[in-house]
Image (cartoon, grey):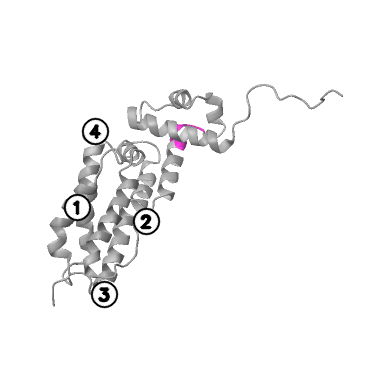
Amino acid sequence: MPNTTPTRRGRPLVPEQELLEKIHAATISLLQARGYEATSIDEIARTAGMAKKTIYRFYANKDRIIEQVILLWSSSIVPLPGAVPESSDDVLRALEEMLCALTQRVLSAEAIALYKLLQTPFTGREALLALYRAKGIDNARRLLREWFTTLRAKNLINPHWQPEDGNYLLSMAIAAPLRDMALGVLPPVPQTALRPHIQDVLRFVAPLLQAQPG
């Protein structure tokens, strides 16, 4: 008996999520390599390997794509671990792991591309810049401030260390590499290993941070 099941013709359907991921990845790649002005729907379609009409199924223009990319990046920020060390000797080790984990997010190729993008004027920039800051470095400052407050209450750090001093710590650990990566002097994480830099920063602040002998 002949098989009467209709044969699907043409290319197999690609799941929408896969299409969106390709659009987002292509957009990030173009922003990183060529900047905002050179990132167009034509170029995104070419880089993603799809027709422009496919992109227009989801987005009206490139600014809407960029907006979604920033929203997705912001929603996936991994917060600093909040575990309290068992002793004052463990504080620096815990800080090192926290800061290394943070660099994986805020100094990745995607994060650097978005940072550079947000230096460029475009529609809706101010709102997206506020979101980028709130979910990125501002969130890290808040979490670190809360962590230091807990450590002080448990006498695990120098009582003269203020919770707000974590802002300076983050500036030393994150801001300098961010500037060099944005300028192209250093490649983003993980191509650049920042653990040695973080260890140097912690050695510098250790005398100020560590609990003094009673």
Left or right of residue 140, residue 165 in this image:
left
CA gap, disc 1 to disc 2?
20 Å
On residue 153, the disc is: 3
Q: Which residue is mark 2?
A: 79
Q: Which residue is mark 4?
A: 184
Q: Nearer the viewer, mark 4 or mark 1?
A: 1
Measuring 63% from the left and 27% from the top, which residue is drawn there? 12
Mark 3 / mark 1, whichever is N-terminal:
3
Q: Amino acid at mark 3?
A: Ala
Q: Amino acid at mark 4?
A: Gly
Q: Amino acid at mark 2?
A: Pro
Q: Amino acid at mark 1?
A: Gln
Mark 4 / mark 1, whichever is N-terminal:
4
Q: Secondary structure at mark 4?
A: loop
**Which of the image's four quarters has the C terminus?**
bottom left
Q: Secondary structure at mark 1?
A: helix
Magenta residues span 60-65
Measuring 52% from the left and 36% from the top, which residue is drawn there? 20
Q: Which residue is mark 1?
A: 199
The location of residue 121, given as percent across then percent down, is 33, 36
Measuring 49% from the left and 32% from the top, which residue is drawn there? 22
Measuring 26% from the left and 66% from the top, which residue is drawn there? 148
Mark 3 / mark 2, whichever is N-terminal:
2
Mark 2 / mark 4, whichever is N-terminal:
2
Whether pointer 1 and pointer 2 mark residues with C-beta atoms closer than 8 Å, the reply is no
198 inside magenta stretch: no
The location of residue 38, given as percent across then percent down, is 36, 25
